[in-house]
Structure formats: C-alpha cells, structure tokens
C-alpha cells in the first residue's frame, strides 16, 4: 500500500489528558462518575487543582480559590488530591507516549509533545497517529486524552484544546491559517487575561487581527511580546520538541490571570513551578546545578536572576528554597504578570560522570575495575581473571 508523499514539514502531536485528576477519581471510584467534583484542599487558602466536566458549566476551574468555587457550585464534592496515584497514572501515560516516539517532551503530569515526523510508515497518517495514541492511552489507563496534530508545537497545542473533552483535531499544514485566524486572541500562547485586555484595547480581538497588524507597530506598543504574538499569528513556531534528557534547561512559567505584587503573592506560583520542574527532572533522571527566576512586570519589562545549586538537586523543596532566596534580589514593588522558574546546568544522574558531587560515577568505577583486572592479569597471566559476566 503506497501513501502520497507527506506534505508535512514536521508532525507534532500535543496530547493532554481531560480533567486529569478528576477523571482518575471518577475512574477509581465509580460512585463519583457523572458528579461535579472539585479536586483540592478545603481550607480557606486552598485552590482548585482540577474541576470535573460536570462542575465546569458553573464557571469553576483550576487555579480558582476553593472558597469561590464552592460558592459557584455548592453541590460539588470536594476531593482531596492523591498525588501519588496521579503520578502513577502519569508514568503509565508517558510510557504509552514513549512507545510512539523517542522524542517526547513532557510538559506536566498529564500533557506532552511528541515529535512524530517521519513516523508515517509505522503509524499511518497524522489522523491515524492521533487515533492510535488516544486508543492506547484509554487501553492502558481507562482515561481520555485529547490530541492535536499540527506542523508546530503552538498549533498542535491549540488543536488539542479546541475539541476537548475527548478531542481529536488534525490541522493540515496548508490549513494552519484558516484554523488559527478566527480564534480569539486568548488562544495566543503567553497572552494572559491582562495581555488580552491590552490587545482588545488596541482593537485586536482575533488572531486574524494580530496577523493583519503592522509588526513594527505591535513591537512598539507591546515590546518583545508584540514580535512573539505576531509570529504565532502567522502560524510560525519553529521550536523543536526537546526531550527533557536533552534539554539545556527545564522551565515552567505562568502568565497570570491577575497581576501579583510582592513575595508572598509570587511564592505559590514558584511553588507550583518547582513541583512541575522537579517532576520533569526526575522523569529525565536529571539534577539541576542552577535555578533561574524570571519575572515580567505588567509593563512587559523582563527581569531574571539566577544562582548555582550546590549540591545539584531534583528536589522541589531545594528548587523552591533557591528561588525564594533569589526573590530578595528583585525589585518587587511593581505588579508582575508572569512568574517563571527554570532549572539549568542539568546533570545526568543515570550515567553520572566522575566528580565529588555524586560520588564515583559508573564510568570511573568501570575504569578502576578494568585497571585492577589488568594488574591481576599481569601478575597471574591471561585467563586467570574473568568477570562475573564473562563466566
Ligand atoms: Mg489536561
């Protein structure tokens, strides 16, 4: 069976589990199916981590304060999160993704990019690929994943979201602009609520409006954000899928719905980012030798500070401590619209190199063993010494 030559420069899949924590609770406890659930703590300072689809019509969603969510949806059941279980299911999903591509970039517990360029012979068309991934995830976990396929990360991510839940959306390369342009500007990556207001005030409501705007003018009014969204609106996003093990750094950042001011307000966002980064470090068997905090003011001024982490760590608490210490070196009087954290100087823990930080590496031990065996051979003649694995 021959297929037409691929018109896809790259095939990027974005897979994102539907209402992940809530779906796991409903899967594990059938009595919760069909009910509105809010996953999160029940204290005055708790936030909703996930709302089940039954709760969402009431206007509740993740990152909302639990107090507000309870007011909006009083009949919802509040379920304390079981992170251990969610991490277990996450491992299963990532294992499934790993069977489809060697290039998987996990963004969080329930979301990943897969670079499937060149995989047509194995898996068929991009539509076949998406369907196979959905089937395999359901087969393994009993859960639903929404999948978007496009020629870039940005478009694939939008595509996975537009038909949620149980979504499957393939954007052929030649349809990219037809797909993007009718969408509202909130679909532009990195534009938070505040950015959306700014764009609307400039008369830009859809992605088509941004694409048609003068890029020089956009840059003048929005700075580097102007360049960024102009390129996205053209469907231009050349960023590669980078598996964590090959990454130079692993970051997590949030453009906030509401600007935050001061260390106490920034802290929960850093904590969330530290958790996500630590999870990705562990997944890649990596430790961070440095931590960088990035803050963007509501006037789009970007500030970063970084520090070395000694010893290197993959622990969320260590990352957070370093990040909080860095906060003291920022001017925090201005409101911030973006809080980001990144781990850099990544060290491979699976194949450690020699050095005092992780003790003796495998390679060094091997060298010492080889040297010792050579000495014995010299003394007792060849054939005397065999390794356990040779016998
Ligand atoms: Mg999800």
Image (spheres, helix red, strand yellow):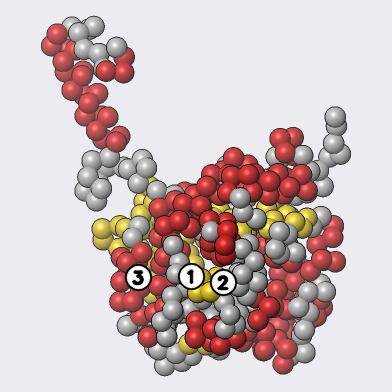
Residue 292 is left or right of residue 357, and the answer is right
Residue 199 on image: x %, y %: 70, 86
Residue at the spot of label 1: 79
Residue at the spot of label 2: 37
At 21% from the left and 48% from the top, the residue drawn is 356
Please identify, in this view, whether the residue under mark 2 or under mark 3 is nearer the observer: 2
Look at the picture and state if 179 lies above or below 371.
below
Helix, strand or loop for disc 3: helix
Helix, strand or loop for disc 2: strand
Q: Are marks 2 and 1 in contact (CB under 8 Å)?
A: yes
Identify the mark at residue 320; answer none if there is no mark. Answer: 3
Residue 326 on image: x %, y %: 34, 76
Give the CA distance from mark 2 to mark 1: 7 Å
Please identify, in this view, whether the residue under mark 1 or under mark 3 is nearer the observer: 1
Q: Nearer the viewer, residue 163 or 140?
A: 140
For residue 197, what is the image quadrant? bottom right
Q: Are marks 2 and 3 in contact (CB under 8 Å)?
A: no
Helix, strand or loop for disc 1: strand
Residue 202 is left or right of residue 340, and the answer is right
Q: Nearer the viewer, residue 236 or 350?
A: 350
């Amino acid at each position: 069976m021959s297929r037409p030559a691929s018109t896809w420069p790259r095939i990027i899949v974005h897979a994102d589990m539907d209402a992940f924590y809530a779906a796991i609770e409903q899967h594990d406890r059938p009595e919760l199916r069909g009910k509105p659930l809010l996953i999160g703590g029940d204290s005055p300072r708790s936030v909703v981590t996930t709302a089940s689809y039954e709760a969402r019509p009431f206007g509740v969603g993740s990152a909302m304060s639990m107090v507000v969510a309870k007011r909006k949806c009083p009949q919802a059941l509040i379920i304390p999160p079981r992170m251990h279980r969610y991490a277990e299911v996450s491992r299963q999903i990532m294992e499934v993704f790993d069977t489809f591509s060697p290039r998987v970039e996990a963004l969080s517990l329930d979301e990943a990019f897969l670079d499937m360029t060149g995989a047509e012979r194995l898996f068929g068309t991009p539509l076949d690929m998406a369907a196979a991934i959905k089937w395999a995830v359901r087969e393994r976990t009993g859960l639903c994943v929404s999948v978007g396929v496009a020629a870039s990360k940005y478009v694939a991510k939008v595509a996975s979201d537009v038909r949620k839940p149980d979504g499957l959306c393939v954007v052929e390369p030649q349809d990219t602009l037809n797909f993007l342009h009718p969408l509202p500007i909130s679909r532009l990556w990195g534009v938070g609520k505040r950015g959306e207001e700014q764009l609307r005030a400039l008369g830009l409501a859809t992605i088509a409006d941004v694409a048609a705007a003068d890029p020089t003018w956009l840059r003048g009014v929005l700075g580097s954000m102007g360049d960024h969204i102009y390129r996205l609106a053209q469907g231009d996003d050349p960023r590669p899928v980078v598996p964590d093990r090959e990454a130079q750094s692993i970051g997590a950042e949030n453009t906030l719905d509401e600007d935050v001011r001061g260390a106490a307000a920034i802290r929960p966002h850093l904590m969330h980012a530290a958790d996500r980064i630590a999870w990705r470090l562990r997944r890649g068997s990596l430790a961070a030798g440095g931590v960088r905090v990035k803050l963007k003011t509501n006037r789009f001024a970007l500030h970063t500070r970084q520090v070395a982490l000694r010893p290197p760590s993959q622990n969320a608490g260590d990352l957070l401590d370093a990040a909080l210490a860095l906060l003291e070196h920022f001017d925090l009087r201005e409101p911030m619209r973006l809080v980001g954290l990144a781990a850099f100087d990544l060290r491979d823990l699976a194949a450690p190199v020699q050095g005092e930080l992780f003790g003796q590496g495998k390679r060094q031990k091997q060298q010492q063993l080889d040297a010792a065996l050579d000495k014995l051979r010299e003394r007792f003649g060849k054939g005397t010494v065999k390794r356990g694995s040779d016998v």
